Image (cartoon, grey):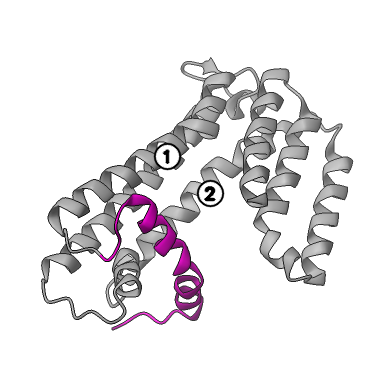
């Protein structure tokens, strides 16, 4: 629950920083993002995580007066979406198990799934998630380049072929990306329920509960790189 609150606070702070053209709020938002990213390590009382947060906060205070400080706002949305695209996309390489197939196998640990269409579908869905995050990253970066005032091209002194209000970039990166991701999540669930009605969960919320439960096992598999050849 705390992570959800922190994520919402980051989104609000980012948007306010854009609206008010505040470099201090921009750096504060990035510091908050680092705190969110390290929340697990902080909960386990890892000393390096505390040092990382303290170092980020100190760096933010040092850079608060820099004229290009607000550039840090444009980095996280593109970087996060590229990271998610890589998370899904690299499992599509030869000799690797698609990420969605891993999820299916964890949700059906004792079932012998005979229908080969399941694995074809899992690979297709993995491709779709990869494509969505690439599109999100491309749009975030493209809008950041031509945003005005304070867009990336403007900061570099390069004339933009056209401009859009920076507020539009903020609305897409802080809300639009999540809306598209949510629509994809719900839409894919509905397609899956129709194609494979024998799922081991009663409804969408039961699926969310079971998917959350397998999260640690999935991350452990990915961190060990136990890709099936």
Q: Which residue is at 47% across, 62% downward?
A: 212
Q: Is residue 159 visible?
A: no
Quadrant assignment for the C terminus: bottom left
Q: Which residue is at 58% across, 24% downward?
A: 158
**Foreground of the two, 61 or 186:** 186
Question: Horizontal and vertical percent for residue 207?
Answer: 36, 58
Question: Horizontal and vertical percent for residue 162?
Answer: 47, 16
Tell which circle, 2 or 1, labels the residue nearer the N-terminal end: 2
Residue 80: image tag: 2
Q: As displayed, is residue 139 above or below residue 98?
A: above
Q: Is residue 148 magenta?
A: no
Say how many tags the image has. Answer: 2
Q: Is residue 59 left or right of residue 141?
A: right
Q: Is residue 152 left or right of residue 139?
A: right
Q: Which residue is at 54% across, 30% downward?
A: 144
Q: Which residue is at 49% across, 71% downward?
A: 219
Query: How busy is the neighbourhood of tag 2: few (under 14 within 10 Å), some, or many (20 plus)?
Result: some
Q: Which residue is mark 1?
A: 136
Q: Quadrant of residue 49?
A: bottom right
Distance Cα–Cα, label 2 vs label 1:
10 Å
**Foreground of the two, 27 or 200:** 200
- Under circle 2, the secondary element is helix
Q: Is residue 227 magenta?
A: yes
Region of the chain picked out in magenta, as a range: 200-229
Query: How busy is the neighbourhood of tag 1: few (under 14 within 10 Å), some, or many (20 plus)?
Result: many
Question: Horizontal and vertical percent for residue 180?
Answer: 38, 37
């Amino acid at each position: 629950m705390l992570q959800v609150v922190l994520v919402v606070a980051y989104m609000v702070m980012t948007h306010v920083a854009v609206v008010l053209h505040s470099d201090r709020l921009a750096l504060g938002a990035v510091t908050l993002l680092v705190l969110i990213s390290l929340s697990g390590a902080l909960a386990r009382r890892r000393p390096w995580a505390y040092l990382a947060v303290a170092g980020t906060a100190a760096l933010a205070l040092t850079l608060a007066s820099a004229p290009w400080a607000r550039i840090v706002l444009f980095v996280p949305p593109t970087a996060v979406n590229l990271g998610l695209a890589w998370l899904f996309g690299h499992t599509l390489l030869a000799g690797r198990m698609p990420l969605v197939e891993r999820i299916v196998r964890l949700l059906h640990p004792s079932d012998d799934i005979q229908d080969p269409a399941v694995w074809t579908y899992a690979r297709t869905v993995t491709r779709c998630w990869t494509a969505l995050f690439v599109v999100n990253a491309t749009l975030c970066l493209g809008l950041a380049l031509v945003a005005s005032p304070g867009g990336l091209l403007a900061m570099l002194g390069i004339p933009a072929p056209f401009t859009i209000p920076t507020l539009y970039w903020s609305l897409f990166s802080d809300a639009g990306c999540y809306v598209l991701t949510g629509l994809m999540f719900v839409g894919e669930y509905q397609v899956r329920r129709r194609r494979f009605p024998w799922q081991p969960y009663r409804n969408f919320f039961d699926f969310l509960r079971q998917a959350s439960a397998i999260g640690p096992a999935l991350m452990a598999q990915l961190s060990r790189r136990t890709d099936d050849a």
